[in-house]
Image (spheres, rainbow, N blue to C red):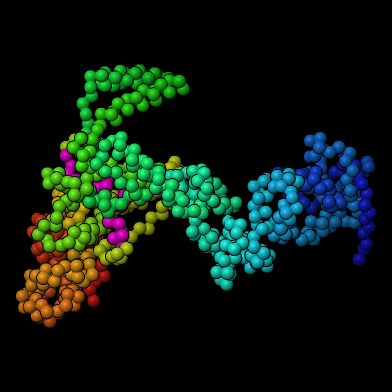
């Protein structure tokens, strides 16, 4: 093996050139070069350049091209002299082999060694700014590495041994508390450690700065009240901030809501104003809504509106002729604002409505104050103004809660049908919208919730699971998390069929309704008729959802009506729970001894008062639904299989 020789020598910077035989051809990034320049200024050249003699007293750099470029840049900036003495190793071996060996036969520093070294510098008294300056890093990057270098030792060693990923250690670094870190470490160390799971465990008791409560009160207000925060240095903006005192957040939010409610009641004169961080939709559904009425303008207001309109028309002509200047655009905005202010003043709630209605003050999903005005509670309604959902259940003999649940089942099934019928959903939405925006005619009740929120009672799905009809949703809604502009563009780009399905699905979820015999809404019934909704195909009375919730005498009366007097007499002495289970079996298609085939067919399709939708001609409430549709009726319910109840066994 041939021997090569080398010897150290200081060479003037302006005598050094990069060798064409240097194997490193890819130029370094600008950020990396800035880091190297900062290190050279702070620490000097820590490793010799490898060079060989060239013509004209020059030396070609075989290894150390990055360092040469950084030194030349510093000289060009006047930060070191042009003849700066550079420590070099003069080498007489094969140039290409020397360059390759210098670049390949090396072992990079473990990332944790760097993190701990940074932490050691800080422990010796160097500030974040000083470390950043000496190594050419941003202060944010130095803080991140310091945080990682100070994670609990047991977790750091697991990272050094490749037992956890860097992402997992970054998740542990969301807090500086070693006690919290080790508590979570001991919980997860025996399994696969997911960074997201670690972060969730460390922040589970905290409240995210992106939550609507924090947006509502403001992070500054929380900190001014003495609240502590946890900051994830590896996340951007508020996404990496958690507030540690949930109780303080809730107190501040409640105080702000209470103030808003007090001011609203005093300023507008409502009978009541109630505070709720989330709108209680189940209660709102029971309320009648009153609306502000258009008022005739006074002569002064009419004259001002006319003057403003003429001014706007002048600017419209200028705009059409050649465009508006910035000053003219500001003037137009001012005129429009004044016009809108007068129009708003001409819409007011009647005194009698203020005397019986109220408002909910809440927080919307974006953390802004939300006010829902004009709500008349059931106990505050007069008989003349009752609308859908008003009043007692009447002759049905059901409790108010049972009537609400039955109505919710009925509504849920209608929603499932509407979600499958774009044409009907479009027609209903357009009809409701036209009444709202044109203000022509009178629309009793609200067939759709115009605020576009789901209408089933709160907790209904949790209580009844898969009973009734479900609305399976396979939509990709990632565009809802984008900015409004990007989200709208992404939604517009969806295939037309997807948009049609999505539209029908959303309209279906806003459909309002209940039992047909409780303040029935003719428009809702017409929608159900058009859709051909067959409630009996999707919901059956069971012990839990119906029979146990009736008085025993009422349950026996239904049994006598449907299954016959003899059956009812034979089961009269059974305990209510046993009777309810037996009735469930018979009304679900499982015929028991003593029940005629014709009675069994009727029982398998029977529905409580107000549950059936009209099919052709409206049947009397409470009448058994025929097992086969009459020839003049719509075709049998064709809801997709995914929506339907399983067949009785």
Residue 69 image point, x, y percent: 79, 44
The residue depicted at 85 percent of the width and 56 percent of the height is 98
Q: Is residue 410 left or right of residue 242?
A: left
Q: For residue 453: magenta?
A: yes
Magenta: main secondary structure equals loop
**Percent of width and height locating residue 242:** 52, 52
Q: Residue at x 37, y 44 (%)?
A: 257
Q: Is residue 91 left or right of residue 609?
A: right
Image position, residue 421 (x, y; %):
26, 53
**Residue at horizontal 31 percent and vertical 21 percent from the top:** 309
Observer-nearest of 227 and 290: 227
Q: Is residue 48 visible?
A: yes
Left or right? Give the position of 406 relative to 324: left
Residue 6 is drawn in which quadrant? Answer: bottom right
Q: Position of residue 124 (x, y in %)?
A: 75, 53
Q: Nearer the viewer, residue 460 or 227?
A: 227
Total marks placed: 0
Compared across the picture, whether 79 is left or right of 167 comes to: right
Residue 212 visible in the snapshot:
no
Q: Which of the image's four quarters has the C terminus? A: bottom left
Q: Nearer the viewer, residue 61 or 543?
A: 543
- What residue appears at the point 8 percent right and 72 percent down from the top-left corner? 560
Residue at the farthest left position: 565
Q: Work out which quarter of the rendered image holds the N terminus and state it.
A: bottom right
Judge whether 302 appears above or below 235 on screen: above
Q: Nearer the viewer, residue 439 or 220?
A: 220
Residue 139 falls inside the magenta stretch: no
Residue 162 figure quarter: bottom right
The magenta span reads 442-461
């Amino acid at each position: 093996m041939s021997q090569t020789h080398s010897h150290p020598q200081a060479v003037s910077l302006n005598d050094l050139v990069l060798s064409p035989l240097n194997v490193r051809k890819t130029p370094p990034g600008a950020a990396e070069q800035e880091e190297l320049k900062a290190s050279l200024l702070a620490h000097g050249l820590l490793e010799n350049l490898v060079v060989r003699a060239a013509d004209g007293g020059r030396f070609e750099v075989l290894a150390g091209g990055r360092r040469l470029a950084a030194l030349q840049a510093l000289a060009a900036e006047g930060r070191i002299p042009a003849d700066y003495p550079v420590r070099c190793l003069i080498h007489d071996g094969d140039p290409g082999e020397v360059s390759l060996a210098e670049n390949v036969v090396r072992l990079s520093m473990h990332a944790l060694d760097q993190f701990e070294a940074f932490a050691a510098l800080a422990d010796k008294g160097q500030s974040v700014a000083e470390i950043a300056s000496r190594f050419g890093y941003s202060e944010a990057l130095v803080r991140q590495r310091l945080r990682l270098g100070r994670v609990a030792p047991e977790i750091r060693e697991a990272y050094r041994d490749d037992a956890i990923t860097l992402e997992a250690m970054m998740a542990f670094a969301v807090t500086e508390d070693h006690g919290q870190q080790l508590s979570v470490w001991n919980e997860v160390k025996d399994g696969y450690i997911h960074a997201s799971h670690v972060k969730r465990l460390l922040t589970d008791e905290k409240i995210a700065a992106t939550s609507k409560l924090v947006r509502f009160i403001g992070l500054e207000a929380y900190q001014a009240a003495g609240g502590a925060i946890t900051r994830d240095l590896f996340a951007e903006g508020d996404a990496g901030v958690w507030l540690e005192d949930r109780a303080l957040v809730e107190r501040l939010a409640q105080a702000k809501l209470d103030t808003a409610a007090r001011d609203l009641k005093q300023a507008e004169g409502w009978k009541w104003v109630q505070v709720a961080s989330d709108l209680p939709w189940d209660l709102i559904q029971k309320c009648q809504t009153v609306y502000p009425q258009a008022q005739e303008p006074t002569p002064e207001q009419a004259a001002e509106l006319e003057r403003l309109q003429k001014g706007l028309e002048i600017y419209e002509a200028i705009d059409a002729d050649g465009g508006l200047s910035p000053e003219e655009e500001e003037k137009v905005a001012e005129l429009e604002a004044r016009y809108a202010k007068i129009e708003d003043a001409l819409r007011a709630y009647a005194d009698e409505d203020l005397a019986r209605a109220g408002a909910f003050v809440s927080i919307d999903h974006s953390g802004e104050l939300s006010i829902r005005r004009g709500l008349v509670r059931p106990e505050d309604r007069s008989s003349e103004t009752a609308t859908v959902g008003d009043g007692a259940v009447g002759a049905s003999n059901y409790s108010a809660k049972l009537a609400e649940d039955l109505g919710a089942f009925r509504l849920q099934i209608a929603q499932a049908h509407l979600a499958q019928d774009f044409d009907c959903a479009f027609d209903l939405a357009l009809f409701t919208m036209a009444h709202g925006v044109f203000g022509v005619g009178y629309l009793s009740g609200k067939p759709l919730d115009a605020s576009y929120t789901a209408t089933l009672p709160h907790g209904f799905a949790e209580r009844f699971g898969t009973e009734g009809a479900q609305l399976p949703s396979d939509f990709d809604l990632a565009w809802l998390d984008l900015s409004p502009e990007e989200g709208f563009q992404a939604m517009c780009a969806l295939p037309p069929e997807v948009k049609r399905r999505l539209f029908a699905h959303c309209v279906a979820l806003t459909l309002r309704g209940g039992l047909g015999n409780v303040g029935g809404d003719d428009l809702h019934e017409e929608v159900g008729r058009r859709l051909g909704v067959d409630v009996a195909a999707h919901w059956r009375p069971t012990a839990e959802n119906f029979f146990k919730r009736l008085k025993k005498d009422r349950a026996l009366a239904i049994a006598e009506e449907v299954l016959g007097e003899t059956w009812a007499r034979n089961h009269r002495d059974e305990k209510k729970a046993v009777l309810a289970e037996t009735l469930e079996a018979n009304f679900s298609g499982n015929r028991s001894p003593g029940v005629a085939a014709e009675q069994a067919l009727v029982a398998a399709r029977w529905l409580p008062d107000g549950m059936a939708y009209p099919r052709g001609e409206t049947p009397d409430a409470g009448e058994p639904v025929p097992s086969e549709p009459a020839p003049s009726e719509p075709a049998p319910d064709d809801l997709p299989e995914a929506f339907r109840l399983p067949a009785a066994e």
